[in-house]
Amino acid sequence: MARDHRSRGHAGLAGFRQDVIAGLSLPQKALPPKYFYDAAGSRLFERICRLREYYLTRAELALTRAHIGAIARFAGKGSILLEYGSGESLKTRLLLHAMRPAVYMPVDISGEALRRAAAKLSREFPDLRIAAVAGDFSRPLELPGFRGRDRRVVYFPGSTIGNLSPGEAQAFLKMTRGQVGPRGAMLVGVDLKKDAGVLHAAYNDSRGVTAAFNLNLLERINRELGGDFDLRRFAHYAFYNAPLGRIEMHLVSLAAQSVNVGQHRFGFAAGESIHTENSCKYSIAEFQALAAQAGFRGAKVWTDRRGLFSLHGLIAD
Ligand code: AVJ
């Protein structure tokens, strides 16, 4: 049975407007990547996950399949499983099947995606207790009851943590450490550092799906906030910033222009960019050091055979 819990948060239109106005007012214009995922953006992201160049999804699924027994043992059968994300993925199903959690709590900003995923899951796992939480997991969450003695484990797959800077990721892990308590644990998917050409191709696919995903953010601003971005006058730009160990995505203004968002007006020089996403890459040692600084011990790490992607099993220290 699926239940719904709505936590206070900034998921609404007012929060979106505030973040967009603030971001476009910065010297280096920037927009938070969490706003990529409206209905169209979520569909585009699903297409990205199927692209030949985008190895992340396939590599994480492969390592999850290969090591599911050990991963489920690490999580602990009968634990409370929180997932940061809606839980639509195949790898979540593998984990649910193998570990049979006492309660499964998907946490997602999109109530719509949550409802869809929870309804589907409760058909596939009729005995599973699902407590969906509509909220922003980047802020401390108020979770429904379930105190008990059960162990809490947070599952955070997909290298979504790469959207945070290392400092932010550390603070986020600390917050999660508080959320799971002294006996808790975390399973976090982290994309690995690798050949820059492989990284570059993953964010510059030949079909232009990633470009459409990036540009959709402007379309969303136009539609929801009364913007007048001309999408033909912005171009997708993604590159690997090696010193900072991250892919950066930008939208580059192809001309000097000004753009209105509601009552606000923003000037762009030709070539000026909006920084829309960071996707940080870590070596295994780098990520374990980060986790250690956040109060977790890196107890286990699994990778795919090609060494593209990692899943870290962290235990509260
Ligand atoms: C969902 C944040 C892991 O960084 O690879 C895919 C998002 N951006 N292509 C990533 C994304 C461009 C993705 N994450």
Image (cartoon, rainbow, N blue to C red):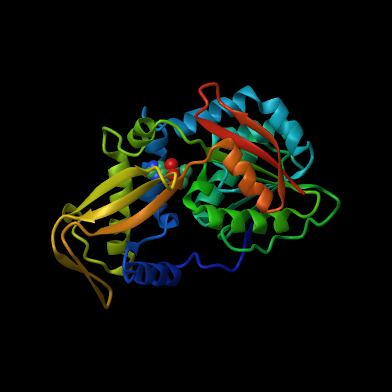
| Residue at image location 45% in from the left, 32% down from the top | 194
Nearer-the-camera pick, 105 or 268 = 268
Which residue lies at the image location 34% right of the left edge and 31% below the top edge? 197
Residue depicted at 71% across the width and 52% down the height: 295
Q: Is residue 150 above or below residue 139?
A: above
Tell whether 46 sits left or right of 230: right
Q: Nearer the viewer, residue 102 or 317?
A: 317
* Residue 177 in view in this figure: yes
User: Which residue sits at x=26%, y=58%?
Assistant: 273
Q: Nearer the viewer, residue 226 or 179?
A: 179
Residue 193 picture location, percent across and down = 48, 36
- Tell me which corner region of the image, top left, top right, bottom left or bottom right, holds residue 177: bottom right
Please indicate whether residue 41 sits to the left or right of residue 190 in the image. left
- Residue that extends furthest to the bottom in the rendered view of this protein: 263
Left or right, residue 17 beside residue 154:
left
The quarter of the rendering in which ligand 1 is drawn is top left
In the picture as drawn, the residue positioned furthest to the right comes out as 149
Closer to us: 292 or 108: 292
Residue 188, by quadrant, is top right
Examine the rendered structure and indicate whether residue 220 appears above or below residue 129. below
- Whether residue 2 is visible to the viewer of this picture, yes or no, is no
Is 278 on the left-hand or right-hand side of 113? left
Rendering coords of residue 59 (x, y %): 50, 28
Residue 32 is situated, as x and y percent measured from the top left of the image, at: 41, 59
Q: How many marks?
A: 0
Image coords of residue 91 (percent x, y): 58, 33
Q: Is residue 26 above or below residue 3?
A: below
